[in-house]
């Protein structure tokens, strides 16, 4: 009788359960079992998110992301939680639906939605305004919803990663030591490379800034030249942070369906680039550009390109 009673808490509140380390660990895991489960699910999912890569490269990237699973989960859980976490699982589901052509918004519904004069004019105005934006191309998520049976389009703009890094370069441009540290940052180097900054130029600049032979004004001139060049390259790029993308996905209202990622090309009659077409293997790409009569939308899904020309009243845009 005494042994059995010792396994239950005393009515007075005194803890009679075994306080050995294994039992305390078991109770702790029972309290927080969901966290390791989510981490394991996240790590497992990383093995399947590189379908456009060769098998060996996919395995390498998957394993690398697996090792980084816990810090990735930490960023997801601390960046606009819970929207980023919801967007993460939304992205996984949407990725597999897109891969197998399930529950996708049809090109016909997209075309019907663009027949609305209000939508055509609104997007034209945004395209015209984007040409004055020098830091980066503008883009984000394009969704479609059905209001009273008619498809309607919405654009959710997301600030590009290259524009964010351009701002950080300017913030650190007044301090040589901070600028060097930023150039040496691993994540920053990946962004520089995707924007078009050659690795050798970056490393040569770091060596020059560390040299004691160069005066302060000369080093500042080198920094300013790097920032100006990065801005010139960034103007025709749109890089998207995965965490910003997940956050935006998590905030999309219920009832709206994600069509794909959109971005504006600032030139006239500027079709999707080879990178845009390649990216369409993983995610549907919507590219919009101005033309002589209005603007053009390119719908690129798995390298299949379809075009929609929209005529607008340009006099209304000037009023």
Image (tube, rainbow, N blue to C red):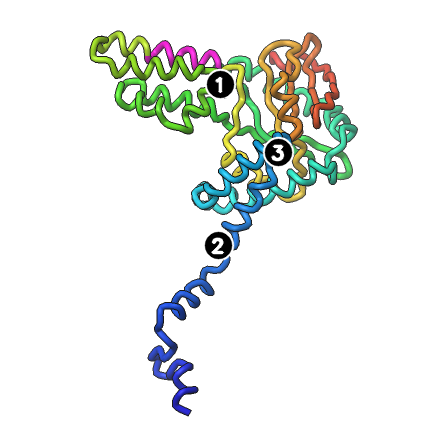
Residue 280, quarter of the rendered image: top right
Could you tell me which secondary element the residue under label 2 belongs to?
A: helix
The C terminus: image quadrant: top right
The N terminus: image quadrant: bottom left
Region of the chain picked out in magenta, as a range: 223-233
Position of 286 compared to 28: left or right?
Answer: right
Position of 316 compared to 110: left or right?
Answer: left
Disc 2 or 1, which lies upstream in sequence? 2
Residue marked by disc 3: 55
Badge 3 vs badge 2, beta-carbon distance below 8 Å: no
Q: Nearer the viewer, mark 2 or mark 1?
A: 2
Q: Which mark is residue 195?
A: 1
Q: Cα distance, mark 2 to mark 1?
A: 36 Å
Q: Residues within 10 Å of mark 2 (few under 14, many from 20)?
A: few
Residue marked by disc 2: 36
Along the viewing direction, whichever of 83 and 293 lies nearer the viewer: 83
Q: Nearer the viewer, mark 3 or mark 2?
A: 3
Residue 138, quarter of the rendered image: top right
Q: Residues within 10 Å of mark 3 (few under 14, many from 20)?
A: few
The reply to whether residue 294 is in sight is yes
Badge 1 vs badge 3, beta-carbon distance below 8 Å: no
Along the viewing direction, whichever of 318 and 37 lies nearer the viewer: 37
Along the viewing direction, whichever of 9 and 128 lies nearer the viewer: 9
Image x and y of residue 61, in percent = 53, 35
Q: Count the marks: how many?
A: 3
Q: Does the segment drawn in magenta span residue 230?
A: yes
| View extreme (front): residue | 56
Image x and y of residue 113, in percent = 74, 28
Badge 2 vs badge 1, beta-carbon distance below 8 Å: no
Residue 189, quarter of the rendered image: top left
């Amino acid at each position: 009788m005494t042994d059995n009673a010792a396994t239950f808490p005393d009515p007075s509140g005194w803890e009679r359960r075994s306080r050995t380390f294994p039992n305390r660990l078991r109770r702790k895991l029972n309290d927080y079992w969901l966290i390791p489960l989510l981490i394991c699910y996240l790590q497992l999912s990383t093995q399947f998110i590189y379908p456009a890569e060769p098998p060996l490269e996919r395995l390498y990237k998957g394993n690398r992301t697996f090792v980084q699973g816990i810090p990735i989960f930490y960023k997801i859980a601390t960046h606009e939680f819970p929207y980023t976490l919801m967007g993460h699982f939304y992205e996984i589901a949407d990725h597999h639906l897109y891969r197998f052509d399930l529950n996708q918004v049809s090109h016909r519904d997209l075309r019907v939605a663009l027949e609305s004069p209000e939508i055509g004019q609104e997007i034209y105005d945004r395209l015209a305004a984007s040409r004055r934006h020098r830091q980066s191309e503008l883009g984000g998520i394009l969704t479609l919803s059905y209001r009273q049976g008619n498809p309607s389009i919405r654009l959710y703009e997301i600030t590009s990663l290259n524009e964010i890094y351009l701002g950080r370069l300017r913030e650190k441009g007044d301090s040589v030591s901070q600028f060097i540290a930023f150039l040496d940052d691993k994540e920053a180097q990946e962004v520089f490379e995707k924007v078009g900054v050659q690795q050798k130029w970056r490393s040569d600049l770091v060596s020059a800034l560390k040299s004691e032979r160069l005066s302060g004004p000369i080093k500042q001139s080198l920094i300013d030249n790097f920032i100006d060049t990065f801005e010139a390259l960034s103007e025709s790029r749109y890089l998207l942070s995965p965490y910003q993308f997940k956050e935006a996905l998590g905030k999309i209202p219920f009832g709206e369906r994600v069509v794909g990622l959109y971005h504006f090309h600032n030139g006239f009659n500027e079709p999707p680039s080879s990178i845009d077409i390649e990216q369409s293997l993983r995610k549907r790409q919507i590219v919009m550009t101005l033309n002589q009569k209005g603007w053009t939308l390119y719908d690129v899904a798995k390298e299949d390109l379809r075009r929609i020309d929209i005529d607008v009243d340009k006099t209304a845009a000037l009023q």
